[in-house]
């Protein structure tokens, strides 16, 4: 045993030895930034409301309406006027999924977040015109992720629908945690109301 510890171990093995006693969950937590505040993924200041009230954005299809598992954020100017608008990370975390899966979903990103209490949630961003993050990237709150599209290039062709951001928020009880999913389902377990979640955790409110 003494001989083992006197050997010159490479850095990667030293890190591995540190992680083994902690278990997978604890080790993963060491890698993640704490998501101690949340913001809306659209708008210049991270504040938006679902209503058409002059802040530039509205939720065209709210959570669970028609069994919708997320929110569809559109510019108040309507149509494809939000093509190319910036999409931001709702909070800090690590990108778990980044791909163009086509079939109406287009470019999709999934960011996983570690909450201050140790719970995990993730945010999904779909129909993007482009993706500025890849799987494994560490992401900061309000960091630019990409731009709004309509599910199929070029943005603005209205196929299969007008440009918008499909935005989901899930916890570990979600059957599609870490996966894209269907966007609509009668099974809602594990999907959270994004607006309700974000409003409760906006900057200055966390921990109060």
Image (tube, rainbow, N blue to C red):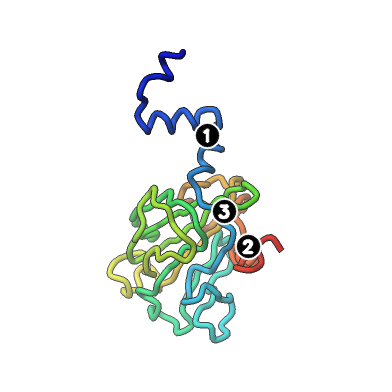
Percent from the top left, x then y, of residue 77? 45, 84
Kind of element beneath mark 1: helix
Residue in the picture at 45% in, 68% down: 165
Residue in the picture at 46% in, 13% down: 1
Whether 55 is drawn above or below 198: the answer is: below
Residue in the picture at 48% in, 57% down: 124
- Which one is closest to the eye, mark 1 or mark 3? 1
Residue 65 in view: no
CB under 8 Å between discs 2 and 3: no
Whether 159 is drawn above or below 104: the answer is: below
Residue under circle 3? 170
Please state, as top left, top right, bottom left or bottom right, where the C terminus lies in the image: bottom right
Mark toward the start of the polypeptide (2 vs 3): 3
Kind of element beneath mark 2: helix
The residue lying toward the viewer, choosing from 55 and 105, is 55
- Disc 1 and disc 3: Cα gap in Å? 21 Å
Residue under circle 2? 197
Quarter of the rendering containing residue 67: bottom right
The residue lying toward the viewer, choosing from 179 and 36, is 36
Quarter of the rendering containing residue 87: bottom left
Percent from the top left, x then y, of residue 76? 49, 82
In screen coordinates, is 128 left or right of 51? left
Circle 2 packing at 10 Å, graded few (<14), some (14-19), many (20+), is: few
Mark toward the start of the polypeptide (2 vs 1): 1
In screen coordinates, is 185 left or right of 117? left
Percent from the top left, x then y, of residue 161? 40, 70
Residue under circle 1? 24
Mark toward the start of the polypeptide (1 vs 3): 1
Circle 3 packing at 10 Å, graded few (<14), some (14-19), many (20+), is: many
In screen coordinates, is 74 left or right of 203? left
Whether 89 is drawn above or below 28: the answer is: below
Kind of element beneath mark 3: strand
């Amino acid at each position: 045993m003494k001989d083992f510890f006197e050997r010159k171990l490479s850095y990667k093995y030293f890190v591995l030895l540190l992680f083994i006693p902690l278990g997978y969950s604890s080790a993963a937590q060491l890698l993640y930034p704490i998501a101690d505040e949340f913001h809306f993924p659209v708008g210049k200041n991270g504040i938006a409301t679902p209503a058409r009230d002059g802040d530039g954005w509205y939720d065209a299809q709210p959570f669970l309406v028609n069994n919708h598992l997320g929110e569809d954020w559109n510019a108040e100017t309507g149509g494809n006027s939000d093509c190319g608008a910036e999409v931001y990370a709702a909070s800090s975390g690590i990108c778990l999924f980044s791909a163009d899966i086509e079939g109406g979903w287009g470019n999709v990103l999934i960011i996983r977040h570690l909450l201050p209490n140790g719970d995990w949630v993730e945010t999904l961003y779909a129909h993007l015109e482009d993706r500025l993050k890849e799987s494994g990237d560490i992401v900061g709150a309000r960091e630019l992720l990409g731009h709004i599209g309509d599910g199929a290039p070029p943005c603005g062709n209205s196929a299969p629908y007008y440009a918008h951001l499909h935005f989901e928020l899930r916890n570990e009880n979600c059957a599609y945690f870490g996966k894209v999913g269907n966007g609509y389902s009668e099974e809602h377990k594990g999907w959270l109301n994004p607006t309700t979640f974000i409003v409760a955790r906006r900057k200055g409110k966390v921990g109060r």
